[in-house]
Amino acid sequence: MSPVKEAPVHPIIVVPFESDTSPALLRRLAHLDVPERWRAVDRSAHAPHIVAVPGDDDDATDWTGAALVSARPGTAYLKIVDAVGDVRAAVAAVVAHARDQGLAQVKWEGWTASSEDAAAAGFTPMCPPLTPPDDATEPVAGDATGPAPGDTAGPATGYVRWLHDGVASEPPPNEPPYYGQTTHFTCGAVTALLAQAHAGTLPPEALDRRAELALWRDATNFLACEPVGLGVAVRRAWPSTSVTVHLDVDRPVLLDHLPDGEQEWRALLQRESRTQAAHLGVPVDARHLSLAAIRAALDRREHVLLLVSLAAMQGFDVPHWVLCHGVVPGAVVIEDPWASAAAGDTWVDAHLLPVADASLDGMATVSADRFRGAVRIGHAPEPAP
C-alpha cells in the first residue's frame, strides 16, 4: 500500500460509551443515525468509547461525525465498530487517536463501512473467515480446555490499517486465513492448521471442521491439547515439518482443575506423549521461551503456537492456544481462533491481532503454578531438484 496522505484532523472528542447509563450521550448522537448494534451487547470489558469530531462552530455538543471504538485489553489496536455522520472525518479522528496512544493498528468492522470509504482512509480489506462468523465460540467458566461454542454474529467484512512511523504500512507478509474453532476444545488443533495454511503446507480450503477434529483427536489429552501431545500430532500430520516443543516444567500440565482420579490417567498419557516425541525426534526444550526468542522465530518466518491465559484479554482465566505469526514494532501479531460475542468481540478483533510484547509475556505464563508452553513450527525442507 502506498502511504496515505493524512487529512487534517479537527480537535478530537473522546468520551466513554456506556449504553445503559449515558442517555444524554445517545441523544447527542441521535442526529447521526446511531446503529442499534451499539447497545445490543455489553462492551464494557473492552473499554468502549466514542471518538467524535466537533462541528465548525466550536459547539461541543454539535458533532459532525463519531465512531464507536473498542479493543481487547492488553493489545495494540483499536477497532471501529461503526462510524456515523461524516464517516471519513470520524475515521481520521480514530486513526489520530490511535497514533496518540502509540498503537500498531486500527481495524474497522464492515457492518456499515463502504469499501470506498475504507480505501480512502488507508484501510485494506481483511480476508473473510473460512468459518461463517456465527460459528465461533463462547467460554465455559472454570473449563481449562478452552472456550465453548456460541454465537458471534460477526460482520461479513472487515478492514485494517497498520500504523508505523507516522504513515500507513504494509501488514506482516502473507496474511493467514482466519478460521474460528467450532468446539470449546479444538483451539490447539486450529492454530496448528492455521500455521500450516499460512506456510503454504495446507491449502486454505482444506481447513475445515473435519481437519480440525481429526488433528485434535490425535493431539488431545482429553479434552485439552497439552504442548507435547500437540507437537507430536503436528509431526505425525506433517512428517517433514520441523517441530520443537517448549515446556519449562518436567511434569504433566493443564490438570490442576481436575480431581485426583481424573489427573492420574491423563498424566500417564502425557508421559506417553514424551516417549512418542523422543521416538519421532521432536525435541522438548525445557528452557523458558522468552518473548525475544518468539520474535526471533517469527523473524525467521517460523510459527509459534503459544499457550496463553485469556484472563487479560477476555476476563476468563482459561488456558487457550493462539498462533503467533508476525511482528510489528512493540507487538506480536497473533491469530486467536476464538472471539467473545458477549463483549462485542468478533473475528475482526481476533484476526491479525497485535498484542503488546509485555502483555503477551504476561498472558503466556499459564496457570497458578506458572509455566510456559509452546510449539514452534519451522519450514519444511525444500524438495530435492
Image (cartoon, rainbow, N blue to C red):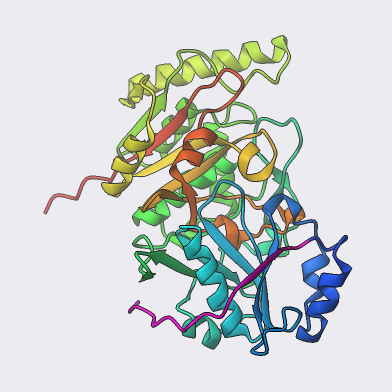
Which residue, as the protein is rendered here, is positioned at the far front? 58
Residue 73 visible from this viewpoint: yes
Above/below status of 47 relative to 122: above
Question: Is 7 colored magenta in this rendering?
Answer: yes
Quarter location, residue 265? top right
Give, as a single range, the part of the protein colored magenta. 1-17
Query: Residue 127, how many percent across, how many down?
Result: 50, 69
Instruction: Return the residue nearer the eye: 328 or 129.
Output: 328
Query: Residue 140, how many percent across, how many down?
Result: 75, 38
Secondary structure, magenta segment, majority class: loop
Residue 159 visible from this viewpoint: no
Above/below status of 267 relative to 21: above
- Residue ID at (33%, 79%): 2
Quadrant the C terminus occupies: bottom left
- Residue ID at (73%, 54%): 343
Which residue, as the protein is rendered here, is positioned at the far left? 385
Quadrant the N terminus occupies: bottom left
Above/below status of 268 relative to 276: above
Query: Residue 58, how many percent across, how many down?
Result: 67, 84
Instruction: Return the residue nearer the eye: 273 or 283.
Output: 283
Question: Is 286 colored magenta in this rendering?
Answer: no
- Residue ID at (50%, 13%): 251
Residue 274 shown left or right of residue 2 in the figure: right
- Residue ID at (62%, 75%): 110
Figure label count = 0
Query: Residue 210, how many percent across, how many down?
Result: 58, 50
